[in-house]
Every structure is written in structure tokens, then in C-alpha cells.
Image (cartoon, coloured by chain):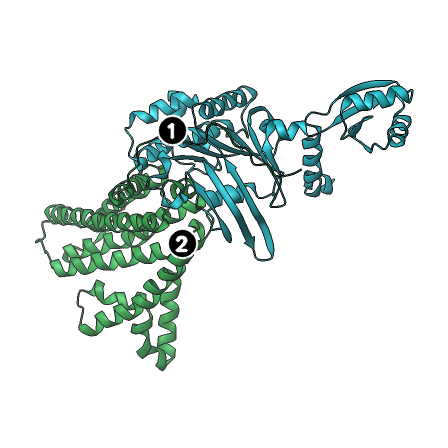
Amino acid sequence: MSTIAVEHDRTTSPVRATPRRIPMSRVVSVELQKMFDTRSGFWLMASIVITSLMATGAVILWAPDNELTYSTFAAAIGFPMAVILPMIAILSVTSEWSQRSGLTTFTLVPHRGRVIGAKLVCAVSVGVVSMFVAMAVGALGNLLGTAITGTPRVWDASVTDLAYIVLGNVLGLLVGFMLGVLARNSAGAIVAYFVYSLVLPPLAGLLAATQGWFRDLQPWVDFNYAQTALFNGAMTGTDWSHLAVAGALWLVAPLAVGLTLVMRSEVK
Amino acid sequence: MIKVETLTKKYGATTAVDDITFTARAGRVTGFLGPNGAGKSTTLRIMVSLTPPTSGSATINGQRFSDLPNPGVEVGVLLDASAQHAGRTGREILAIAQRTMGLPSRRVDEMLDRVGLTESESHRRVRNYSLGMRQRLGIGTALIGDPGVLILDEPANGLDPGGIRWMRDLLRDFADGGGTVLLSSHLLHEIEVVADDIVVIGNGRIVAQGTKAELLHTAGTLVRAADLDRLARVLAGSGISARPSGDGALRTDVDPDVVGTIAFEGGVALTELRNAEGAGLEEMFLELTADTQREGAAA
């Protein structure tokens, strides 16, 4: 059968007003909404507050009176945060692939860089706000705990200390984001995050304990190790260099690879 | 209007879409017909910038999809009704589309109404939707921006007969209002009842395209007789080639009156003689399908 070109009467669409480009602010606000509007998303966000309260309660109940200080509360709340924040970042990216909603997302905004950028803005904002919420809960816990036990209130964390802790948690969140972009699969990215945060540190510690050459190298190549100084509250110039080099290796480079893959890949 | 020009997509050594060119015109429903795995979905994904082509181009109203400033208000797209976050309600999914496009929020209710999802259904999570309800929701997402172009991949899948009729009327009205509709299907009948133009694709290549009338009328004559062998001999004696078509019938490319005259002169009693409308397209389509007939191969 031959190919036939046929002309028809109506070959033009009705005249329409030229649409305006979707502003970035709108992409960000829609992505923020998407982090909260699913049941799993809602409970993930709620778990930030819930686990903060639980950690605070645990400190009041079980911490020795002389350790009932603000830094104890901050440290206790820090543990669940270090797990939940990266999960939020991972799922914000991977659900587009695992749930296949990306088919619609990337059709409504056919610029993946804008969507991924918006997700990054949302994840970091949620992370920072969560940290402030957690710190406020910790402060309330300190007020309440010392009132109950009648011990003196100790505010032994400076603004700089808290800023370091926020930075440390945001870096953890960014590692989660990077793994999400790289894996584009919820289960894969979550497993990868736990391998990175729970399995690698003891292995690196073992290597450093037994191999002299690695002991000197570790702060430069072990991102987990390089971040410990942040949580100890004292960052020297060398510590910052360690953080920058290890961060380039474990965060910036793989993120660049992941973003390139996202731009090129097919969305199915 | 959608224009696809010399579009090719290769995956390694496999060519999924092989140098295809066609146009879907405004005011018409264009059916994109082909068996499973023919390259329909890949072509549609390339059109909406989800898959990068190896070469060639696809434009919508003269622009590449990714150059459209706010694609949702110009092109309604439904590629896979199941590709939705299962944890969102139907209403939330429409609201995301509405907010992304910058539309007033009343559009969500208007769309629910238009695609026939009730208030209580709209508050259910999509995980609890039937495929038919997902198709309706997908159509709602495609229509919410009031676009001039619709691109739909197998939209009738999972719809009940009433739903299929509803979909058909909706597409007809959309095209009659000046819109461009491109819909894919692996079912000939589905395309036949709604499309004005048909593009047939098989193994990544376009094997036929034209208006429905042209494709259905180029099929010659279908003729039946009790003594089919004798009929074949008589026709062959007059230099007319005929081949078997379906059960107990022959098909030729000459007109019915010629076949009737020859059969009368040859003394063969005919049981049926008619214009083989659609038979050509159907045979061609069956031939295409036979190559990729997985069910047949597995049995």
C-alpha cells in the first residue's frame, strides 16, 4: 500500500494565547506539595516530630541527672534525624521512577534539571527546617527535664555547634539525594545509603587500625570520618579541607554522574 | 498538528523505530495502529521528550515538545494510566497537574465531573482504582489544561463497553472542535470506529498510512462460492489472480462486477459477492501481527 499525503480543510489549530513559561517557584512549590501529599510522605515528615519527641522523652527518663544538658538532648535527637532526612531526600527523587509518576512529571515540565533542582531545594529546606524543629524540641526537653529533676539548666551548645550539626545533617541528606539520583530506585538507594552510613565506617575503621598507610589517608577519603569533626563542634582549617576533599569524592562526583544519567535516560 | 519526520530510535543493534514520517492533522483523529512491540509507545515517548531519538524529529504545532513553555496547556498526554503514585488520591493527582500548569483550582472539580469520577472516588487512593478509573483519571490529567492536541497511548485499555463509547465520543468531539488527536492501539476495530486517518506501524516501520476511507477501499472484491476450487480455476482462466481470504472466500483486486460476470460465464454459482471493504487492512494487520504473535508461538 502506498503512502498517501492528503490535504484537509482544517490544517491549523484554533488561535490560542501564547502560554507563559512555568516559573521555577511553581515547580518548587509543587514538588514541596508532593513530598507531603502521599501517606508515606506524610508519615515520614510526621516521624521527624515524633522521633524528636521520643528521643527527648528517653533522655528525660533515662539520662543521669548530671548529663541532663542541652547537648545530650541535641545528640539524642540527632540520631533519628540522621536516618530520616536522607530517606526523605531519597524518596523525593526515586518515587518518580519507582512509582512511575515521572511519566507525568517530566511531561508537564519537560526539563529534568528544573524538576531535580526543585527537589533538591525542597529536600534541603525540609532538612534545615526539620533540624530547627528538632532543636526546639530538644530545648523544650531541656527546660522540662531540668524542671522535673530540679537540676541546673545547662545550655552547652553554641550557635556554631548547632550550625555544624545542621550542616552535618544536610550533608547526610545530600548523600541520600545523590544516591537517589544515581540509583533512581527506592529500594536500591535506601540499601546503598545504609551500606554507606552503617557498613562502611566500621570497615574503614578496621582498615585504618591495621594499615598505617590508610590511617593518614582516611580523613581525606572517608566522608563519614571527615564529618565527625562537625559533630564534635570544633572545625579546624584542616578539618574543612578534609571535608571538602572527601565531599568532592563521595558527594559531588557521584552526583554529577547521576545527574548526567538522569538527563540522558529514558523515562518509562 | 503533530509532525513526525524521519524519526529513528535504535537500542544497540535493535531498531525500535525505523525512519518514520507522518502527520496528525488538526480537526482529525489519527489512529496509530500496530501490534504490540511495533514501536508505537517508543514513538509517542519521543514525541513528548521522555525518550531521546537517535535521529529525526517530532514537533507539535511547529515546536519541539521540550520547547513548549507550558506543555500541559498545549498538549494533553496519557501514556500509561497505571504510571501514577499509588499513594495519592485521584483528586491530588489532578491538583498537581492543575498547580503545575498554573490553572484555577476549580478545574480539578470540572475535570472529575467531565471524566465521570464521583466525589467519593476522587478521595480514594489510586492504588484502589480499577484500570478503567485510572484511564479516566489519566484522560482528566490530559484534558485539564484545555489543550489543542491530545496524545494517548492505548486509552481504551481497561474501559468497559460504556467507557469505550464515552472515550470515542470524547475524542470525536475534541477533533470536531478543531483539536488534534493521536491515539495508538493494537486493536484494528478500535481505531476503525473513531479514526479519520490511520497510520499503521509494524516492526518500527510505517507500512501504510492514509485516510480511513482510502485504506478501507483499496481492497478489491471478496467472493464466495460453494465450489471454491472451480471459482479459482475460472478466475485464473480469465487471468485474474485470487487468493484465499478467511474461510471459504477468495479475494481479488478487480471490481465485483468483473468477478460476477466471469463467474456467470464460467457457470459458477456464487454465494457471496461484495466489495472487500476493510479486508485488505485486516489481512495486512494480521500478517504484521503474525510475525510478533507471542501467544501463538508459546502455544
Q: Which residue is mark 2?
A: A263
The quadrant of the picture occupied by the N terminus of chain B is: top left
Report x, y in % for residue B84. 43, 37
Crowd tier of the residue under label 2, counting other residues whose Cα lies within 10 Å: few below 14, some 14–19, many 20 or above: some
Report x, y in % for residue A7. 52, 32
Task: Point out the residue furthest to the bottom here.
Answer: A212
Q: Which residue is mark 1?
A: A14
Q: Chain of mark 1?
A: A
- Residue in view at x 18 percent, y 73 percent: A237
Residue A256 visible: yes
Residue B115 quadrant? top left
Total labels: the figure holds 2
Q: Chain of mark 2?
A: A
Residue A158 quadrant? bottom left
Which labelled disc corresponds to residue A114?
none
| Marks 1 & 2 on one chain | yes
Q: State the SS at label 2.
A: helix
Q: State the SS at label 1.
A: loop
- Residue in view at x 34 percent, y 54 percent: A177
Q: Is residue B176 left or right of residue A90?
A: right
Taking depth in this image into account, of B298 and B66 the one nearest to the observer is B66
Residue B86 quadrant? top left
Contact between marks 1 and 2 (CB within 8 A): the answer is: no
Among the two numbered marks 1 and 2 on one chain, the one whose residue lies closer to the N terminus: 1
The answer to whether residue A233 is above or below residue A62 is below
Colour assignment, chain B = cyan
Report x, y in % for residue A118. 29, 48
- Residue in view at x 30 percent, y 58 percent: A172
Crowd tier of the residue under label 1, counting other residues whose Cα lies within 10 Å: few below 14, some 14–19, many 20 or above: few
Colour assignment, chain A = green
**Amino acid tagged 1:** Pro
Q: Is residue B78 left or right of residue B225?
A: left
